[in-house]
Amino acid sequence: MKYKIEIAPLLDYYVIAAKDKETDELVETFTLNESGTDMLKLLCEGKNEMEVAIEIANIYQVPLEHVFKDVIVFINRLQKKDLL
């Protein structure tokens, strides 16, 4: 991850704060659902696309091929926000 990520629960969603690693200045905020937050946490741990997809498929008991597509879309969105 390009920034330090902080996660806070809020009702059925999570608020994500991306902060500069050196200055701790807030760069971006956004919300994610539980599965998106799980993907983000795994990416922050340094897992690659396939590792994230495998773990999410196991957590939510869904087919890997469906999850892998979602992980790729999620990563593309993070890249467009310049967070990765």
Image (cartoon, rainbow, N blue to C red):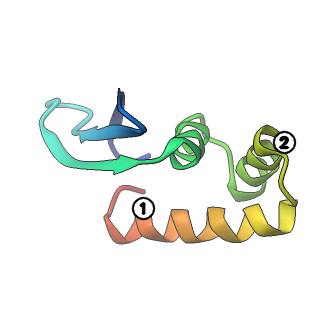
Among numbered discs 1 and 2, the one appearing first in the sequence: 2
> Comparing marks 1 and 2, which lies closer to the viewer?
2
Within 10 angstroms of label 2, few (less than 14), some, or many (20 or more) residues? few
Q: Residue furthest front?
A: 11
Left-right relation of 2 to 66:
left
Instruction: Looking at the picture, tell me which residue is in the foreground, 22 or 41.
Output: 41
Measure the C-alpha gap from mark 1 to mark 2: 23 Å
Which quadrant does the C terminus fall into? bottom left
**Marks 1 and 2 in Cβ contact (< 8 Å):** no
The residue shown at (33%, 48%) is 31
How many numbered marks have been drawn onto this rendered protein structure?
Answer: 2
Q: Which mark is residue 78?
A: 1
Left or right position of 44 against 71: left
Residue 2 spot, x, y in % from top left = 37, 48
Q: Nearer the viewer, residue 54 or 57?
A: 57
Crowd class of label 1 (few under 14; some 14 to 19; many from 20; radius 10 Å) = some
Q: Answer with the quarter of the image where residue 10 lies.
A: top left
User: Which of the two residues, 83 or 53, is positioned nearer the viewer here?
Assistant: 53
Q: Position of residue 40 (x, y in %)?
A: 52, 44
Amino acid on which disc 2 is placed = Asn
> Is residue 65 rendered to the left or right of residue 39?
right
Q: Which residue is mark 2?
A: 58
Res. 57 mark: none
Q: Residue at x 84, y 46 (%)?
A: 61
> At x 36% / y 72%, what residue is drawn?
80
> Where residue 49 sits in the image (x, y, percent)?
69, 58
Quarter of the view holding residue 8: top left
Q: Amino acid at mark 1?
A: Leu
Q: Secondary structure at mark 1?
A: helix
Q: Secondary structure at mark 2?
A: helix
Please name the residue shown 14% across and 40% down the image: 26
